[in-house]
Image: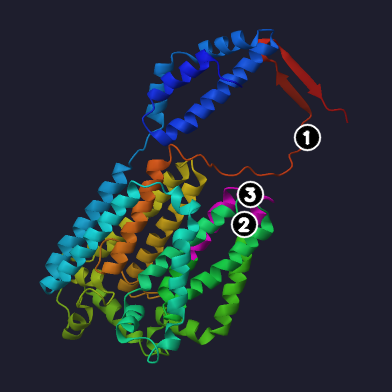
Amino acid sequence: MERNGSVQAWLETAGAQIRWRRARRALLRELEDHIADQARDFEALGDGAGAAAERAVAEMGDPTEVGKELDRLHRPRTNWSLLIAVLAVLGLGIAAMTLCLDGEYLLRRQLVAMGVGLAAMAALWGADYSFFLRRLWLWGAPLLAFCVLTLCFPLWRGAVTPGRLSAFLGRGTFYVYLFLPLLYTALVCRLRGRGRLTAALASLLIVPLALLPMSRPDFSTALICGASMLAVLTAAAWAGWFQGGRTACLACAWGPVLGTAAAVLLRYGQYLGSRLTPIFRPEADPLGKGWQALLVRGALERMPLLGGTALTQTEAQFFHPQGWSNGFDLLWLAARWGTWVLLAAGMLLAVLALWAALRVRKLKSGTGKLLCWACTSILLVQGAGYLSTNLGWRLFGAEAFPLLTYGPGYLLADLVLVGIVLSVFRMDALVRDGAAERRTKAAMPGEVIIPLPFDRGKIRIERLK
């Protein structure tokens, strides 16, 4: 529809009230389309083009009031409750480290990592998260290149790799793999609207990506990445992103990855046995590490709920957080203050899971939902593994509890994930990519009632058998 003077003036007045530039363009486009539809209806009733446009504009109401209401509904909104909770947990971590860390160097190192992480979180918080989905090659290609570089690291060790690069690749980079589920989420977003075969192929892709950390070897990070990617694909299939029905798509999402994972585990059955044996029978651990689980469980039995208890010399030496890098930070705190520390950590994970279930599902953006599921599942699985290790049940040992325990690399990665979640909630009022409609064939109803415009009656159509 060509704009006449009244339509143009109305849109300009309404647009002047919308302060967010990106929202203004999208909303004015929708308002113009709505005015055009109204004008066509009036033309169908016999009005001329100019009169129909004038009448359609008049029905839209006061442009200033309409613009102010749209500005109120479509503006960036910070999730202040999440931000305050993150800062509170970081404060608890600093307080615990101040009391438990030996030496100012370790505390200073953690504070520097926290400062860099908060800066990264703030930058992502104010950014448009959809940029990372639209410009996947800009960060996805370097991430894959890095993973391939570390995959080849065992071949270079002691041969070509220089000493400092060898140390960098060998010890300080495992947390980078935590961003693999974000890369996988961006790929799933590009497969939206395709069929069940695409869902099955996306499922097959999970295992190769999750096995990249195994080159270190790093079973914990591989499990975190695999579980997070499977959660993302499950959420996409449940939301109807793939054609063919929800049940069939869920089967295609779970079947290939479980089958491939089973084949890999059968191939490396001895390694799997070495991971599972200490959980149920620590004394029969083939790697001889079952004494760690027995030591943890024995210490927990003597710890009261409130107030710590004296550890044996062996336990104190083993649990002491030498740089908070041995994986028993929570247990060391529980030995000083009581087992309520472990209970509080478990409640924190439960609250995060409940928050994700209630808040993320209310997001309007489909891509935002997937990104939030990826980020929160990484944090949840990471925290669950770390907590289980400190309880003496080591299925896998994550290196840190999110935002709370020591580990500069993990803290930086976790704050980046939080920044992405904050960006999703901030941009949700604008991004319009709701869940794809399922294209299943609906059954023909017995009758259809079509209301005529302007309350002029109804048309009833019956299907003859």
Find residue 327 and report its image quarter. Answer: bottom left
Q: Quick one: SS at disc 2?
A: helix
Residue 174 percent across, percent down from the top left: 37, 73
What secondary structure is the magenta-colored segment mainly?
helix
**Quick one: label 2, few (<14), some, or many (20+) residues within 10 Å?**
many
Q: Position of residue 318 (x, y in %)?
A: 22, 82
Give the amino acid type for the residue marked by disc 2 in the picture.
Answer: Leu
Total numbered circles: 3
**Looking at the image, which residue is at 17% across and 64% down?**
96
- The picture places residue 270, in percent across and down from the top left corner, at 51, 87
Residue drawn at 48 percent across, 65 percent down: 141
Residue under pointer 2:
250
Quadrant where the C terminus sits is top right
- Residue at coordinates 20% horizontally, 58% vertically from top-left? 92
Q: Residue furthest right?
A: 465
Residue 54: name its quadrant. top right
State left or right for residue 127 relative to residue 249. left
Circle 3 is placed at which residue position? 193
Cα distance between the residues tagged 2 and 1? 26 Å
Whether residue 156 is situated above or below residue 401 in the rendered picture: below
Per the image, the residue denoted by label 1 is: 444
Q: Amino acid at mark 3?
A: Gly
User: Where is residue 53 drawn, in percent x and y?
Assistant: 58, 13
On the question of residue 228 being in view, the answer is no
| Number of residues whose C-alpha sits closer than 10 Å to that of mark 1, classed few (under 14), some (14–19) or many (20 or more) | few
Of callouts 2 and 1, the N-terminal one:
2
Q: State which region is magenta.
A: 227-251
